[in-house]
Amino acid sequence: MLSARDLTKSFITSEGPLQVLRGVSVDVAAGESVALTGESGSGKSTLLHLLGCLDVPDSGTITLQGAPLHNLDEAGRARVRRRQVSVIFQQLNLIPSLTVVQNLKFQARLAGVLDPDWQGEITARLGLSTLLDRYPEQLSGGQQQRVAIGRALAVRPELVLADEPTGNLDEATADAVLELLLDGVARSRSALLMVTHSPRLAARLSRVVHLQEGCLR
């Protein structure tokens, strides 16, 4: 499904160039769930941004279903983000002026692939049916996270990238949210790459890869 080879990425700082990724290669198969671990500052979020077409690598290649992503222009990357790749951010990025049901439908409407039956299944499976008319500020952290997961899965993406999706939740809620995410990914037949600091949660995924000082170990 996803193949990245020899990715490098640097950023300009006041002290000169800072190399964050140093030749990272990773594959994720269709239906596979992979945990990405590593210390803060190791480059995990940077790698997700490259794989999610939110940024471009300095060098290296990224392909999704055999199609190159690393050399797309901004319009091409936006098309990939709308339909093929869904990103669940740590900050969630729900739209505060939209209700739960509007947030759930937002990405699918943009992509032109809104499926009412699939939308209803996601809503019911995530336990959001009684919350549809609420706004994000009226939800708990766990409820907001479920909305973010539902929005990401609504387009049946080929790849789901999740950046610490349970980082701000208590253990019981984190377990429940991860179970819903894994179930949703399985139902939509997507691949999943999830950043987590929790060895306990990482162990529940198919495979664990570790990023250290910009390199996968």
Image: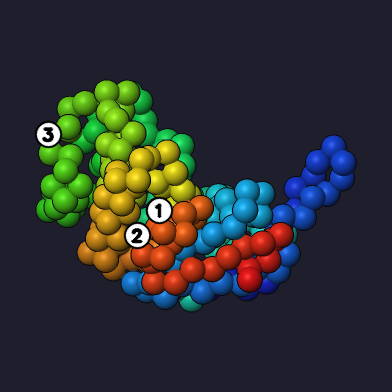
Q: Position of residue 208 (x, y in %)?
A: 49, 68
Kindly identify the amino acid type of the residue bearing the numbered disc 1.
Answer: Ser
Inter-mark Cα distance, 3 to 2: 25 Å
- Residue mark closest to the camera, 3 vs 2: 3
Pointer 1 residue:
86
Horizontally, residue 9 falls left or right of residue 190, namely right
Q: Which residue is drawn at 34% across and 34% down?
A: 141
Pointer 3 residue:
130
Horizontally, residue 64 falls left or right of residue 154, namely right
Kindly identify the amino acid type of the residue bearing the numbered disc 2.
Answer: Pro
- Residue mark closest to the camera, 3 vs 1: 3
Mark found first going from the N terminus, 3 or 1: 1
Pointer 2 residue:
157
Indicate whether 41 appears above or below 6: above
Q: Where is residue 135 in the image (x, y as percent from the top left)?
A: 27, 25
Horizontally, residue 146 falls left or right of residue 39, namely left
Secondary structure at badge 3 equals loop
Indicate whether 93 appears above or below 205: above
Kindly identify the amino acid type of the residue bearing the numbered disc 3.
Answer: Thr
Cβ atoms under marks 1 and 2 closer than 8 Å: yes
Secondary structure at badge 2 equals loop
